[in-house]
Image (cartoon, rainbow, N blue to C red):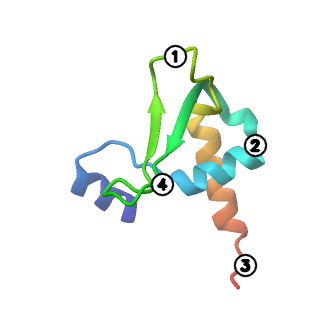
Amino acid sequence: VFLNERRAEYNEPHILWPDPLAAAIVCRPEIILSQEARSIKVETGHTLTRGQTLVDYRRRPDKPPNTQIIREVDGQQFRDLLKMAVHNFDGF
């Protein structure tokens, strides 16, 4: 019900789950279908964009890649992992 309400509210067929997805990738990196090396920087100044991650898509030779950006994952495997985690959750 919750997911269907969010899909309707945001008019999106998919919902992003960045934290559970990051955890799933750590546990099962084989769910990654495609990734690419990029140079990123995190804004640390005292501006409105503090904390924003900036990705350089220009492939500049003076800025070598310093991270891998996940472009695609196996959605079914991710959903299966998420369901398994929720099913096996025992509480605190």
Q: Amino acid at mark 4?
A: Thr
Q: Residue tagged by mark 4?
A: 44
- From the top left corner, tell me how far across and down residue 23 is, in percent: 67, 53
Mark 1 crowd level (few <14, some 14–19, many ≥20, 10 Å Cα): few
**SS label for mark 1:** loop
Distance from disc 2 to disc 4, alpha carbons, whole Å, reads: 31 Å
Distance from disc 1 to disc 4, alpha carbons, whole Å, reads: 22 Å
Task: Select label 1 or label 4 by which is in front.
Answer: 4
Q: Residue tagged by mark 3?
A: 90
Which of marks 4 and 1 precedes in the sequence? Answer: 4
Q: Amino acid at mark 1?
A: Arg
- For the residues labelled 1 and 4, say whether their Cβ atoms are less than 8 Å apart: no
**SS label for mark 4:** loop
Position of residue 64 relative to residue 83, above or below, is above
| Quadrant including the C terminus | bottom right
Out of 44 and 77, give the one closest to the viewer: 44
| Quadrant including the N terminus | bottom left
Which of marks 3 and 1 precedes in the sequence? Answer: 1
Task: Select label 2 or label 3 by which is in front.
Answer: 2
- For the residues labelled 1 and 2, say whether their Cβ atoms are less than 8 Å apart: no
Q: Residue tagged by mark 1?
A: 59
- For the residues labelled 1 and 3, say whether their Cβ atoms are less than 8 Å apart: no
Distance from disc 4 to disc 3, alpha carbons, whole Å, reads: 38 Å
- 22 on left or right of 46: right
Mark 2 crowd level (few <14, some 14–19, many ≥20, 10 Å Cα): few
Which of marks 2 and 1 precedes in the sequence? Answer: 2
Mark 3 crowd level (few <14, some 14–19, many ≥20, 10 Å Cα): few
Q: How many marks?
A: 4
**SS label for mark 2:** loop
- From the top left corner, tell me how far across and down residue 26 is, in percent: 74, 47
Residue pictured at 57% horizontal, 24% vertical? 63
